[in-house]
Image: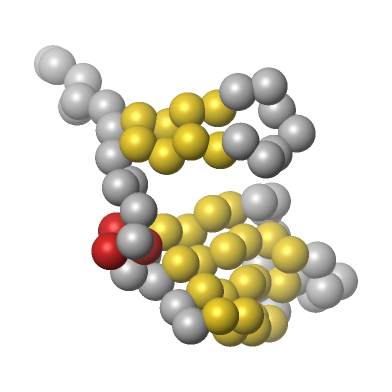
Amino acid sequence: MLYIKLTDGVSTESEEVAEGVVIDFDERNRVIGIEIEDASKFIDLSRLEVMSLPIVSLVLSEREPAKT
């Protein structure tokens, strides 16, 4: 499962908008998160690029654990 947290808050309602895609809403009916069930079957989660958010560039890549 992939959960994209958009803002802090407690989910008071959820709606499945497509098969396996659930949107979480807070008490003011604002979207606070998006859940994608079995996301790894559809996309490679070791590298996730976000292009449509209001940020210049964001690339999330799988990191190696810190060496102690």
Q: As drawn, which residue projects farthest toward the left?
A: 68
Q: Is residue 67 left or right of residue 21?
A: left
Judged from this view, the residue extending furthest toward the right is 28
Task: Identify the residue shown where x is 66% and y is 51%.
Answer: 6
Q: Is residue 64 above or below residue 46?
A: above
Residue in front for this viewpoint, 12 or 53:
53
Q: Residue at x 69, y 39 (%)?
A: 53
> Where 61 sits versus 18, above or below?
above
Q: Quadrant of residue 4?
A: bottom right
Q: Residue furthest top?
A: 68
Q: How is the image coloured?
A: secondary structure
Q: Quadrant of residue 23?
A: bottom right
Residue drawn where x is 29% and y is 33% of the image: 62
- Residue 8: give x, y in percent of width and height: 67, 53
Q: Quadrant of the C terminus?
A: top left
Q: Quadrant of the N terminus?
A: bottom left
Q: Nearer the viewer, residue 45 or 29?
A: 45
Decide which of 10, 14 is in the foreground and name it.
14
Q: How many marks?
A: 0
Q: Quick check: 60 left or right of 34? A: left
Please, is residue 19 above or below residue 5 in the view? below
Q: Where does the image place residue 38, in percent across and percent down from the top left?
A: 32, 69
Q: Is residue 63 left or right of residue 49?
A: left
The image position of residue 56, as x and y in percent, is 68, 22
